[in-house]
Image (tube, rainbow, N blue to C red):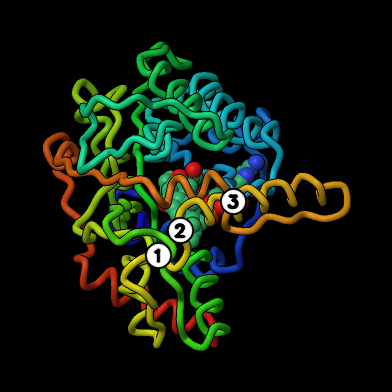
Amino acid sequence: MLLEQEPRLRELRVFDLHLSSWLEELKTGPVQVTPIQGDVTQAHQVAAAVSGAHVVIHTAGLVDVFGRASPETIYKVNVQGTQNVIEACVQTGTRFLVYTSSMEVVGPNVKGQPFYRGNEDTPYEALHKHPYPQSKAQAERLVLQANGRKVQGGLPLVTCALRPTGIYGEGHQIMRDFYLQGLRLGSRLFRAIPASVEHGRVYVGNVAWMHVLVARELEPRAELMGGQVYFCYDKSPYKSYEDFNMEFLGPCGLRLVGTRPLLPYWLLMLLATLNALLQWLLRPLLLYAPLLNPYTLAIANTTFTVSTNKAQRHFGYEPLFSWEDSRTRTILWVQGSTQ
Ligand SMILES: NC(=O)C1=CN([C@@H]2O[C@H](COP(=O)(O)OP(=O)(O)OC[C@H]3O[C@@H](n4cnc5c(N)ncnc54)[C@H](O)[C@@H]3O)[C@@H](O)[C@H]2O)C=CC1
Ligand SMILES: CC(C)CCC[C@@H](C)[C@H]1CC[C@H]2[C@@H]3[C@H](O)CC4=CC(=O)CC[C@]4(C)[C@H]3CC[C@]12C
């Protein structure tokens, strides 16, 4: 997105624990693309990568709500890693920092309270027990508190955080897992969550586009945007998690069976709790990390949707991809990814 949309871009450094082969394909244009294999938990590696950069977009994170990684590892990557990025900006004199936060820093909360089409100012008790939302919330706080800190050279750091709702699009592995599971079940999936529970979703291309716009506008609009949070949104329809997935899986030949959940909620919660128990029991022998656990069930079963125009008001954001484009691109990816 940066290469396509930012004419002033001179160099793009991509810092990641695992460098993908597609990065090589980006090296053919006039902009220098520099892949750097590194770990955000290693402060010196981060500082070396950040040195001389005009803007840092910090999107690296350990996304784990399935119990694959320990809470300590999640904290180390998401919180300590973010602190390292902030310190690297301060030490090297980089003034603009964009952080990929998450809707999860707000909710759904431990009380399972709905957040119905809320915005950045909607009152909501952001109470979390799970390490992923806790770590993202702590990291976001660090980023916002760092706004205004003096960087090397004496000028102030300008930071802001973007909070995507559930991201979908090309590369969405869970969508592909549901597709493969549906094929195994005779081209069907069975409804587990009531259709009335709305879950916020945003297309990956629009998330990227919003990051590019923020990176571009942070300098001229530092006063307005510094220290701010923005939900990442687009025109994707408000639907339940499963009904939304069917927008893509339906055209790929799957159908969602049932207008109501096949199993009652208490039974799903029992299964989810059994999964958590099994995960704990088996941990010394193997990693058992199914999609269904009490936390993922609670997220999927709690309404959380946003309705805001803050990004439009503050930096002129309009989605780059329409809902129709986003849908078509995702369908093509699901179809292509399993062949
Ligand atoms: N997937 C979603 O629905 C949402 C994701 N987010 C946030 O967006 C960001 C990207 O998430 P996804 O693309 O979904 O996850 P992902 O797992 O595909 O991407 C995370 C990237 O961070 C890198 N990374 C992990 N640990 C690292 C380390 N120690 N050092 C350097 N790089 C490391 C990974 O190699 C990976 O390329 C994350 O910060 C996540 O919290 C926010 C809202 C929703
Ligand atoms: C039938 C089951 C109960 C369905 C399980 C679906 C879950 C695996 C996913 C439902 C909601 C997803 C999360 C949500 O989109 C918000 C997220 C934001 C992030 O920052 C990271 C990813 C995630 C936690 C996402 C993870 C998968 C779900 C829990």
Disc nearest the viewer among 2 and 1: 2
**Quarter of the image where the C terminus is located:** bottom right
**Where is residue 70 drawn, in percent x and y?**
71, 38
Q: Name the residue rendered at 88%, 53% in the picture.
A: 285
Picture disc at residue 55:
none
Q: Tell me the SS state at disc 1.
A: loop
Report which quarter residue 205 is drawn in: bottom left
- Asked if the residue under mark 1 is in contact with the one under mark 3, i.e. CB atoms within 8 Å, the reply is no
For badge 2, the amino acid type reads Pro
Residue 264: mark in rendering: 2
Which residue, given by chain and number where applicable, does mark 1 sit on? Answer: 261
| Residue 124, horizontal then vertical, whole percent | 29, 27
Say which label, 2 or 3, has the lower sequence index: 2
Relative vertical location of residue 98 with respect to residue 333 in this rendering, above or below: above
Residue 270: which numbered mark, if any? 3
Q: In the rendering, at what x and y percent does residue 53 appear?
A: 46, 36
Amino acid of disc 1: Pro
Taking the image as shown, residue 165 lies to the left or right of residue 22, namely left
Q: From mark 3 to mark 1, how far is it between C-alphas?
A: 15 Å
